């Protein structure tokens, strides 16, 4: 039996717009989404902002109702029997919200331990274990408002694990963390995975999914567009080559010129400090470097490298498809 | 559930006393309300009348803190992102929200003491409590009844994002309906029966009668009875509004 089942789920958000002539606007956040997570698996839900990742998690954690479709968590229905689900799942979201700022970490954990029904005789030990796990021992009596974002995030993890849930939902847990903090958090997630917990992780950091997840699903505009192991998704683009160009002063006209070059399938642009990094995807074997440099004559190109496609390339291709 | 309630009460009281904004408000309100009561009645009124007016002011403070404080607290929980966590917890929502109301009603004791102290120091209103035991029981009954009435209002706060403004809109109608601002003699007759269903009416009567050494116990009994009734109404209301909030996605700020 799967630990988490999402079957043909759709979710429509309605909002009222206009002042005098009120009308209802509808946004279809999820459209016929289906996937399943096996017990003990770390499953990644990947997608850009607004793709429907958080909506999916909120439905699974009983905080939202689906418009249609069915969901099951450990065999229980989050819509009809929310309390059965609530006592068995942990929910951790990214960012610095979800804690009482004016209280210490210890006070936060004590409160949530009572709210999540941790037995009184286990409470102190459990809190000590978790403070140790997330590396906050020694700072537990400080007010949360004095914590860095990374410390808050680790405290979130501790809070989500207080009642030792069988299924853990991690919604972009490393968002906004510095590289060291994010790496430490990934190590904590890996420890949880190795201890046999079922985890559903949402992220838009592909290396994170590649490093941690056994299987992933890519969601875009509310639809699942691919599902499989990270290796199988990478295989979608193994017949491609990626040329990475680091350059300064790349104009919009130059970018357009690159996009229309023969053989170019897609171009992703990222800002890296002052420079721009262009990831140009093409079919394997296409001689593209000379035409590429020709299109970028007005820019200051500092490096050009050809590399094998990564999970990120597969992801970009999947979410770029119309 | 008792642990969750007690823990919630502790957390809410700690949050309150650590908020300079809340603490300043709690200092200003009793002073303002007691001053208004004195200035409205004038120094010519007898000590008993002025003291009774101070008690009315204290009940107004209690209801104001509960209803505005509850709205503010729910808005704050939304902003902090903790509302989703308590709604998504296995403990019933009524157990987790009632401490928010009760904590604010408990601060009503402080409001009562400060109102009476300010009346004594600034205007020379004497402290006239004839039956201390009944007075203490009246304070407890008043806190419970006002806190649980606030819980019914809080059920709507779970659904609506503008909880604080809903609280504001409920503050003065209850003052008026309970005869705390104007005497019933100048209010429409139909407000009389409405006031019977509102906790501040019985809370004020209980306090005033205990202070005057009359027969406060029926009023104290009404406070406790209303608390039970309010709780019985609040539980299904919370369940309905929680379901609606999950449907309309209003547990989060935006």
Image (cartoon, coloured by chain):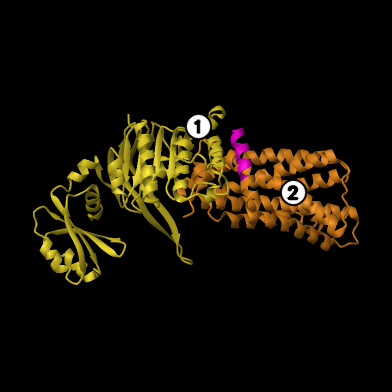
Chain colours: A yellow, B orange
Q: Could you tell me which chain the residue with mark 2 belongs to?
A: B
Is disc 2 placed on a helix, strand or loop? helix
Please indicate whether residue A133 sits to the left or right of residue A105 in the image.
left
Find disc 2 in the rendering and name its residue.
B110
Q: Nearer the viewer, mark 1 or mark 2?
A: 1
Please indicate whether residue B188 sits to the left or right of residue A118 in the image.
right
Q: Looking at the picture, does residue A8 appear above or below residue B189?
A: above
Tell me the crowding category of disc 1: few under 14, some 14 to 19, or many 20 or more residues within 10 angstroms, Cα based. many
Quarter of image, res A255: bottom left
Quadrant placement of the N terminus of chain A:
top left
Relative to the observer, which residue lies in front, A87 or B174?
A87
- Is residue A86 shown to the viewer in this render? no
Q: Is residue B39 in the magenta section?
A: no
Q: Looking at the picture, does residue A272 appear above or below residue A313?
A: below
Quarter of image, res A185: top left
Quadrant placement of the C terminus of chain A:
bottom left
**What residue span does the magenta drawing correspond to?**
B1-12
Please indicate whether residue A115 sits to the left or right of residue B140 in the image.
left
Measure the alpha-carbon separation of dots 1 and 2.
37 Å
* Residue A309, horizontal then vertical, whole percent: 19, 49
Q: Residue at x 55, y 32 (%)?
A: A124
* Residue B174, horizontal then vertical, whole percent: 70, 53
Find disc 1 in the rendering and name its residue.
A126
Same-subunit check for callouts 1 and 2: no
Q: Could you tell me which chain the residue with mark 1 belongs to?
A: A
Relative to the observer, which residue lies in front, B30 or B221?
B30
Q: Residue at x 22, y 51 (%)?
A: A313
- Main SS class of the magenta portion in the image: helix
Tell me the crowding category of disc 2: few under 14, some 14 to 19, or many 20 or more residues within 10 angstroms, Cα based. some
Please indicate whether residue A177 sits to the left or right of residue B238 in the image.
left
Is disc 1 placed on a helix, strand or loop? helix
């Amino acid at each position: 039996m799967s630990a988490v089942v999402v079957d043909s789920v759709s979710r429509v958000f309605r909002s009222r717009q206009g002042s005098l002539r009120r009308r209802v606007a509808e946004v279809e956040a999820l459209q016929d989404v289906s996937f399943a997570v096996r017990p003990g698996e770390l499953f990644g839900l990947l997608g850009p902002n607004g793709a429907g990742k958080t909506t999916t998690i909120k439905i699974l954690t009983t905080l939202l109702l689906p418009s249609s479709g069915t969901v099951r968590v450990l065999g229980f229905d989050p819509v009809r029997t929310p309390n059965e689900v609530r006592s068995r799942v942990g929910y951790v979201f990214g960012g610095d919200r979800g804690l009482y700022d004016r209280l210490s970490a210890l006070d936060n954990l004590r409160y949530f331990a009572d709210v999540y029904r941790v037995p009184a005789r286990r409470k102190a030990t459990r809190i000590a274990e978790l403070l140790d796990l997330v590396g906050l021992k020694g700072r537990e009596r400080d007010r949360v408002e004095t914590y860095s974002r990374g410390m808050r995030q680790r405290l979130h993890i501790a809070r989500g694990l207080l009642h030792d849930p069988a299924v853990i939902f991690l919604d972009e847990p490393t968002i906004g963390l510095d590289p060291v903090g994010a790496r430490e958090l990934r190590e904590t997630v890996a420890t949880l995975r190795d201890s046999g917990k079922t985890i559903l992780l949402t992220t838009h950091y592909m290396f994170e999914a590649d490093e941690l997840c056994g299987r992933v699903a890519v969601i875009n505009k509310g639809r699942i567009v691919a599902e499989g192991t990270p290796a199988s998704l990478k295989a979608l683009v193994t017949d491609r080559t990626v040329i990475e160009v680091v350059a300064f002063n790349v104009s919009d006209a130059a970018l357009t010129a690159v996009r229309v070059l023969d053989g170019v399938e897609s171009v992703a642009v990222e800002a890296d400090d002052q420079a721009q990094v262009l990831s140009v995807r093409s079919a394997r074997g296409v001689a593209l470097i000379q035409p590429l440099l020709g299109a970028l004559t007005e820019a200051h190109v500092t490096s050009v490298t050809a590399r094998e496609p990564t999970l990120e390339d597969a992801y970009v291709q999947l979410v770029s498809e119309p | 559930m008792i642990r969750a309630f007690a823990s919630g009460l502790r957390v809410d009281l700690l949050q309150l006393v650590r908020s300079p904004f809340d603490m300043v408000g709690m200092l200003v309100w009793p002073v303002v309300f007691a001053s208004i009561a004195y200035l409205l009645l004038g120094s010519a009124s007898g000590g008993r009348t002025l003291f009774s007016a101070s008690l009315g002011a204290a009940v107004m403070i209690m209801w104001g803190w509960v209803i505005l404080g509850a709205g503010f607290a729910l808005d704050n929980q939304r902003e902090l992102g903790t509302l989703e966590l308590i709604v998504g917890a296995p403990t019933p929502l009524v157990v987790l929200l009632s401490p928010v109301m009760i904590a604010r009603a408990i601060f009503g004791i402080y409001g009562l003491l400060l109102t009476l102290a300010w009346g004594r120091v600034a205007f020379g209103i004497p402290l006239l409590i004839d039956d201390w035991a009944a007075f203490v029981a009246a304070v407890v009954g008043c806190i419970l009844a006002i806190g649980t009435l606030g819980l019914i209002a809080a059920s709507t706060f779970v659904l609506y994002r503008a909880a604080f403004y809903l609280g504001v809109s409920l503050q003065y109608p209850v003052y008026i309906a309970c005869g705390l601002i104007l005497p019933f003699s100048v209010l429409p007759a139909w407000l009389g029966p409405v006031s019977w269903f509102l906790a501040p009416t019985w809370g004020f009567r209980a306090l005033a009668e205990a202070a005057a050494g009359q027969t406060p116990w029926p009023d104290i009994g009404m406070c406790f009875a209303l608390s039970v009734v309010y709780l019985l109404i609040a539980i299904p209301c919370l369940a309905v509004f929680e379901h609606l909030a999950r449907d309309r996605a209003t547990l989060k700020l935006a």
